[in-house]
């Protein structure tokens, strides 16, 4: 199979977001169980509600600009997801949209730059870094590997696959980390041995998003 994902249209990105929403719906109980071990026990419930709101907002609607689409996604998450997750995910998608702007299509390089901007937004809200046992343990390696692969002119499909694998490794690494942010940080060393629920949900969202983009391009 040749190279794919030369451009990402707004229409195809909507499909990828709906795929991410479905992944959250299917994993609601798992995310809640992870959060019950080291948090408030509501992460899956909150994200399920948030992405149902996203789906209601964007499904069947016609968008011509990434900024408009991702602003709607950000608002839906911000106002429907409780706790810290709403502002964090809202900021991630809002900053992505601001970076992509009013264009109807984006190259993979532009997408990588938008993801980097989204990660910066999460950092600015959460004041965290990698290895704090948070969603950044997934978002940062995903963004860094994606940008590196794009800069090295790696075939586009391979870029996404490597980025997802880096995100998976980051998610799994959180099991052995001591939480330094959020409610889990109150547990100190007792947080070791548990996967971070934010890292788990971030991975689900990114994996489903990338798989949908790959599927759309492969089917052309």
Image (tube, rainbow, N blue to C red):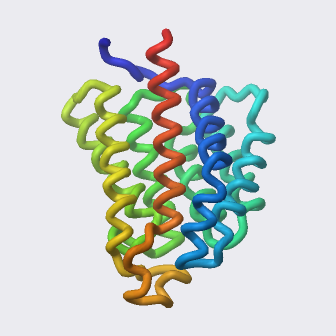
- Measuring 57% from the left and 64% from the top, which residue is drawn there? 88
Which is more toward the observer, 119 or 196? 196
Horizontal and vertical percent for residue 36?
Answer: 60, 74
- Measuring 44% from the left and 15% from the top, which residue is drawn there? 218
Let me know if residue 158 appears in the view: yes
In the drawing, does residue 102 fall left or right of residue 81?
A: left
In the drawing, does residue 193 fall left or right of residue 12?
A: left
Q: Measured along the vertical axis of the image, is residue 88 above or below residue 7?
A: below
Horizontal and vertical percent for residue 103?
Answer: 56, 29
In the drawing, does residue 211 fall left or right of residue 78?
A: left
Which is more toward the observer, 5 or 219? 219
- Measuring 73% from the left and 45% from the top, which residue is drawn there? 54
- Measuring 52% from the left and 37% from the top, which residue is drawn there? 209
Horizontal and vertical percent for residue 1?
Answer: 31, 12
Let me know if residue 75 appears in the view: no
Q: Measured along the vertical axis of the image, is residue 155 above or below residue 28?
A: above
């Amino acid at each position: 199979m040749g190279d794919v994902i030369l451009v990402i249209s707004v229409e195809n990105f909507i499909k990828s977001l709906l795929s991410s929403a479905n992944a959250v719906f299917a994993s609601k109980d798992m995310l809640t169980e992870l959060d019950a071990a080291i948090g408030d026990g509501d992460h899956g419930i909150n994200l399920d509600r948030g992405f149902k709101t996203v789906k209601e907002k964007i499904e069947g609607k016609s968008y011509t600009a990434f900024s408009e689409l991702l602003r709607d996604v950000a608002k839906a998450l911000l106002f429907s997801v409780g706790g810290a997750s709403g502002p964090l995910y809202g900021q991630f998608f809002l900053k992505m949209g601001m970076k992509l702007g009013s264009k109807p299509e984006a190259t993979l390089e532009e997408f990588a730059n938008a993801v980097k901007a989204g990660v910066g937004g999460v950092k600015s809200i959460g004041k965290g870094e990698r290895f704090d046992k948070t969603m950044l343990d997934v978002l940062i390696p995903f963004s860094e590997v994606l940008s590196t692969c794009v800069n090295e002119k790696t075939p586009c499909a391979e870029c996404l696959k490597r980025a997802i694998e880096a995100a998976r490794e980051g998610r799994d690494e959180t099991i052995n980390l001591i939480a330094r942010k959020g409610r889990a940080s109150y547990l100190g060393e007792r947080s070791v041995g548990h996967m971070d629920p934010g890292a788990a949900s971030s991975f689900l969202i990114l994996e489903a998003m990338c798989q949908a983009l790959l599927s759309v391009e492969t089917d052309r």
